[in-house]
């Protein structure tokens, strides 16, 4: 009985695999990753375009999709292209967004590039420097640490973030309360190499309520 059921299940999976249309799947992925969708961020025009595309596509194959909407009190997005440049040390040059660094959900707004020497955080803030954190304290402890750095004239904080299986840093769209200094997430293995280098970062975030939708 068990053997028969397993055989039937295996046969069903094999049938599904045979019916999978790789070309069609790639065409769908290409459409949803198009440049004009700009990452499909929640609350962005690209998100709305992607939702409309999915509804139209599902309708074209005979389905009757309905879009459900949901409200998010606050999301953040980049106002324009970010940049992080390193002067000196093994990482000298321009870092790559999303592979080497990413926006941090608790970062203060940056209206202009911020520059300073990257200094490993040991509890003693350094004026004009980026504080490099090996670990990020949670909740109010992070707020208190940021306040210490800010009181001493620090530029901001560089925090670790591990890449996902694809090698990219995960995009985060919501987070806890905003702190009073810029915060930039840097790939963990690279962050350790920044100490002593001059880092110039511009990661301009804007925040607003957003309406999401999915078919």
Image: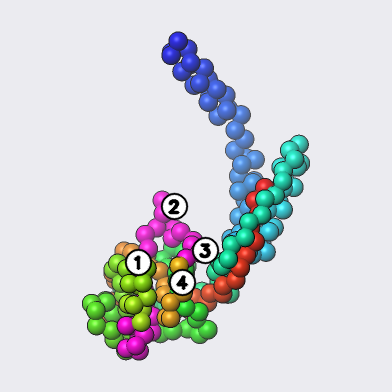
Mark 1 to mark 4 CA distance (whole Å): 11 Å
Residue 102 on the magenta segment: no
Nearest to viewer (mark 3 / mark 1): 1
> Tag 4, which secondary structure?
loop
Nearest to viewer (mark 4 / mark 2): 4
For marks 3 and 1 on the same chain, the one whose residue lies earlier in the sequence: 1
Q: Quadrant of residue 43?
A: bottom right
Q: Name the foreground residue: 151 vs 19.
A: 151
Q: In which quarter of the image is residue 210?
A: bottom right
The percent coordinates of residue 21 (x first, y second) are 62, 35
> Tag 2, which secondary structure?
loop
Q: Name the residue under label 2.
A: 166
> Tag 1, which secondary structure?
loop
Mark 2, Cα crowd under 10 Å, few <14 / some 14-19 / many 20+, is few
* In contact (CB < 8 Å): disc 3 and disc 1: no
Instruction: Single out the residue that lies furthest toward the front.
Output: 140
Nearest to viewer (mark 2 / mark 3): 3
The magenta region covers: 148-175
Mark 1, Cα crowd under 10 Å, few <14 / some 14-19 / many 20+, is few
Q: Residue at x 60, y 44 (%)?
A: 26
For marks 1 and 2 on the same chain, the one whose residue lies earlier in the sequence: 1
Q: Main secondary structure of the magenta part?
A: loop
Q: Mark 1 points at which residue?
A: 138
Mark 2 to mark 3 CA distance (whole Å): 19 Å
Q: Residue at x 41, y 75 (%)?
A: 183
The percent coordinates of residue 20 (x first, y second) are 60, 33
For marks 2 and 3 on the same chain, the one whose residue lies earlier in the sequence: 2
Q: Name the residue under label 4.
A: 177
Q: Name the foreground residue: 208 vs 82.
A: 208
For residue 173, which numbered disc appears in the image?
Answer: 3
User: Is residue 152 visible from the viewing direction of this image?
Assistant: yes
């Amino acid at each position: 009985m068990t053997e028969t059921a397993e055989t039937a299940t295996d046969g069903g999976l094999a049938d599904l695999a045979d019916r999978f249309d790789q070309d069609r799947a790639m065409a769908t992925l290409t459409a949803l990753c198009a440049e004009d969708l700009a990452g499909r961020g929640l609350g962005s025009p690209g998100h709305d375009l992607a939702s409309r595309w999915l509804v139209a596509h599902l309708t074209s194959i005979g389905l009757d999709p309905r879009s459900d909407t949901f409200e998010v009190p606050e999301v953040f997005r980049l106002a324009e292209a970010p940049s992080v440049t390193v002067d000196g040390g093994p990482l000298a040059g321009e870092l790559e967004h999303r592979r080497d660094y990413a926006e941090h959900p608790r970062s203060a707004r940056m209206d202009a590039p911020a520059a300073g020497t990257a200094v490993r955080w040991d509890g003693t803030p350094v004026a004009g420097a980026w504080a490099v954190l090996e670990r990020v304290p949670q909740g109010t402890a992070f707020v208190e640490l940021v306040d210490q750095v800010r009181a001493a004239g620090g530029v901001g904080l560089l925090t670790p973030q591990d890449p996902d299986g694809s090698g990219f840093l995960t995009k985060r769209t919501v987070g806890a309360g905003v702190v009073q200094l810029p915060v930039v997430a840097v790939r963990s293995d690279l962050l350790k190499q920044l100490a002593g280098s001059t880092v110039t970062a511009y990661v301009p975030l804007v925040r607003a309520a957003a309406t999401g939708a999915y078919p």
